[in-house]
Structures are given as C-alpha cells and as structure tokens.
Image (tube, rainbow, N blue to C red):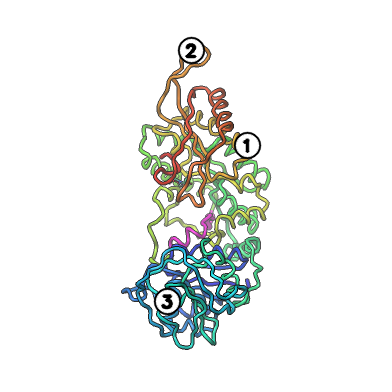
Amino acid sequence: MTDRILIIDFGSQFTQLIARRIREERVYSEIHPPTKSLDWVRDWKPSGIILSGGPASVYDDGVPLADPALLALGVPILGICYGMQLLGQLAGARVIGSSHREYGRAVLDIVEPDELFAGFEPHVGTNVWMSHGDQLEASPSGWRVLARTPTSPVAAFRADDAPLFGVQFHPEVAHTVDGERMLSNFLFRVCDCAGDWTPGSILEEQVDSVKRAAPEGDLICGLSGGVDSSVAAALVHRAVGDRLTCIFVDTGLLRKGERESVEAVFGDHFGFRLEVVDASELFLERLVGVTDPEEKRIRIGHTFIDVFEEAAARCGDARFLVQGTLYPDVIESTSVTGPSAKIKSHHNVGGLRPNLPFALIEPLRELFKDEVRAVGRELGLPEAMIGRHPFPGPGLAVRVLGEVTAERLATLREVDAIYLEEIRDAGLYDEIWQAFAVFLPIRSVGVMGDGRTYDNVVALRAVTSRDGMTADWYPFPPEVLAVMSNRIINEVPGVNRVAYDISSKPPATIEWE
Ligand code: XMP
C-alpha cells in the first residue's frame, strides 16, 4: 500500500465522514484514537494526518491532547475544529471561548488561497459548516491566516514553513459546499497522494493477509446469506480454498427461498464446503409461548450459539473463525471515549461466546458497507446478494408479533415473498433501505365470495434510510400498493386485510419488535 491518511479521532460525530470522504477520493484512510504513541504514528507511515473535531474544549480537564512532537514529524497535518484548536495551542496561540458561538452555516472569506484553497477566488464567499464554541484569537507567530468568517478571525490558518493547516469549519460535511475540493487539495496538493486506492485493491491485499494469518489449518465461517458474511466467506475462500467450511444455520425464521438461494450460490455455483444445519424445530420449540420481543431475541441468540458451536465441533479441528465485522463496528469499540456502549444489545444477538477456541479472521474490518459491496462485486457474487436489504439476526421471529408458530411463519413467508416480488417488479427495490411484511396477532372481519371471514391482518413496511439509525416510510405509488394488497389477499389463505405502515424512525423503529 502506498498512500494512507491517518485520522486521529478526538470524538467528533463527523469523524467517520472524514474517512469516507478521503476514501471517496481514492486514498486509503484509517481512524485511530489519540492514545497512539508517536512511535506508532511514525511506524504507520502516514502520508498525511488529520486531527478530527471533538466535543471538548482544550481547557477542559482530562481532554485528549496531541503530542507536540507530532508537528515535527515532517508529515502534513490538517486540524479540523477541535483539531485546529489543538494545533493552534501547540503552536502557542491563545484559544478563547468565543462570545459568538458558531453553529451551522457561515460564509468563509478566503484571504489567501494557498495550497489548501487552490482554485478558490480570494474574497468570494463560500458556505461552510461550523460547530464550535472555542476559537483562536489570532494566528500564532510563524503561522498565517488563510480565511476568516464574520465571527472567526482565524477560520483557517497554516504554518509558514511547514505543511501544517487548520480549519475551524467542517470540510467533511455536505453543508460545506466546497469541502470536497478543500479535502482533495489537502490530499493531492499538500500530501501528494496518488489517489489509486480502490476497494478492489484491498481485495488482493486482504486475500494475502488471510493467507498469512491462516497459513495452515481449517477455517469456519457462519454464513447467513446477508451481504457481510457472504463477502467475507467468498474473500476467505479465495485465499484458502477448501480449508474453509461455511456453516449455514436454517433457523426456520428465514424468508422464503433463503436457504435454497444460499445453497445455490455457495454450494452449487461457487462449490464451497457448505454445512447446512436445519435447526428450525429446535428454534420453534424454544420459542413456544414467548411473546416478549427481548425474550425472543435472547432465546434465539442462545439457540444460535448452541447450534453453531455444535456444528463447528463437527468440522474437525478448525482453528480459525471468519467473521464479517465491518469498519463501523471496529470504530465503535475503539473510539476516543474507549469501548462504547452505543450498539443496541439486540443487534449483538447472534454473537458468539468470547472464549471460543478460535483465532478470528475479519477480512472486512477496514471497510464500510458500500466498499464491502464493491469487493463482493469484484469477487463475482451475484448482484441480488450484494444489493440485499438488511435482515435482522432474529429473522421473522421479530416480524411475527406475539407468539411465533410454524403456521404464522408460513403465512408471513408467503406474504413477504409477494411483497418483495412486487417491489422488484416495480423497479423500486434499490430505492428502499429495507422492506418487509409483519404478521399481526389480531384478526379482522372481511367478506370473500358471499361469506364472512374472520382472518389475519398483515402490515407492510418499507423505509428509506442512510444507516438504519433514522428512517422515513417509503411513499409507494398507490397503484403499486393496490397490486400488492390484491395479490396478498387473493393468494395467501388466511389473510383478509393488509395495512401499510406510515411511521418514521424516530419515534417508531424499523422493526415492529
Ligand atoms: P430498529 O428496529 O432498531 O432497526 O429501528 C434498525 C436496524 O437494525 C435491524 N435490527 C436487527 N438486526 N438483530 C439484528 O441483527 C436484531 O435483533 C435487530 N433488530 C433490528 C433492523 O432490521 C434495521 O436494519
């Protein structure tokens, strides 16, 4: 690997965005906490360093600081917001609590284009996004002001004789209109990056690193049919071939045709060693009489672990366990505040016991979701698998409200299949983050033929979202909804009513349970 940018995370909510923007410029980047030593930084050989923003003030007690020797490494540095104030303070400037806190849009007046603002006209305002209380009073000696706003006399500055820059605003957010150009100036003009990194180039690198990490011995991988585990398995298979066995647990809580499609793709098409475990009866047994959503999740999680461990034990003496951990999961646990408790407990269900006798292989731990998809394409996985909507670990059990029974699951599976088929036929699948049907534990009166019915009600849910944290309901054209409802009621026995969920998140969640 040639160029890479080190992002030191001081806790800003935008730090992940910085990494994304840089990778979009085809330069590799990683986020690390400020506790890394100077030697570590030197050995990492960054082409440039970005000090992120953060919620603290440099004067607060116990706040993360930077080593002054960082400035003498000879590596270009860009400090953003809190990162800029740190730079300023290290260079001897006074950071003051601003009497004009700036949150939101501000107009940046570039007084000197220099390298960071190359291509910008001086004194033609550009909109930037601010979010700070403190600010620099004046640029320290040996540094000069590159830009200001009406309330920040030093909105951007640089050292006279070194490639050290600071900006008070956030170039990584979309509201900073020319932020992309500023970051690309830093990458290509200041750090002299080549811009030749692609998720594809990480594929070969990861294949090599899996070979090095597991030079001999067997590996196992839990395959769910979702994007992450599918790509992780395919990548590791490329590295170690038949030393890999994939374990697919049929929980009986999957969508229609799911098991068959995993068997077709990984077994028949790719020829992986695939162990399919049908544990559907066991899962159903353990769910008898359970109506509480969290209790469902706990029982499913425990059952999954039992089944998986037993299947793993049957795979001889596998020493390595492949997991599809992604970069956002990794950052969550190494953030500036230490391992964070942000991940909802229910999203961890399905995780394995921490003391398993396996060494972990996590070939996707440096990638974001869309990069994982790009690697999947490179590996030749079918588009239908790569572009799939997320599916929760507990599966249809949290979409059958109330008690889960085989009959209810069967009904839901049929409804869900028709719903998704209509979405695909209307060409809308890729516009939607997640779409699914929900079985409601109530019955309603209807009329079919000339007779009265007293049957089940299902709800349909479709949302748009960027990350699943917030979501909005998807406005289907009425004619599409009409076809869905008609088909479901006509084709699925026992359903006489279809409702469409028009709740956003918050206050609702995406799943009903
Ligand atoms: P909520 O319902 O919390 O869902 O708005 C946000 C995202 O998380 C998924 N989800 C889960 N995923 N195990 C999972 O693996 C779970 O227990 C679980 N619950 C929700 C949900 O499908 C959505 O993508």
Label 3 sits on residue? 85
Residue 392 is left or right of residue 187, and the answer is left
At horizontal 61% and vertical 75% (from top left) the residue drawn is: 118
Residue 293 is left or right of residue 207, and the answer is left
In the depicted view, which residue is nearer to us: 89 or 250?
89
Secondary structure state at the residue bearing disc 3: helix
Question: Does residue 206 appear anywhere in the picture?
Answer: yes
Secondary structure state at the residue bearing disc 1: loop
Secondary structure state at the residue bearing disc 2: strand
Question: Does residue 215 appear anywhere in the picture?
Answer: no
In the depicted view, which residue is nearer to us: 255 or 155?
155
Q: Position of residue 88 (x, y in %)?
A: 43, 80
For residue 451, the mark is 2
Labels 1 & 3 near each other (Cβ < 8 A)? no
Q: CA separation, marks 1 and 3? A: 52 Å
For residue 426, the mark is 1
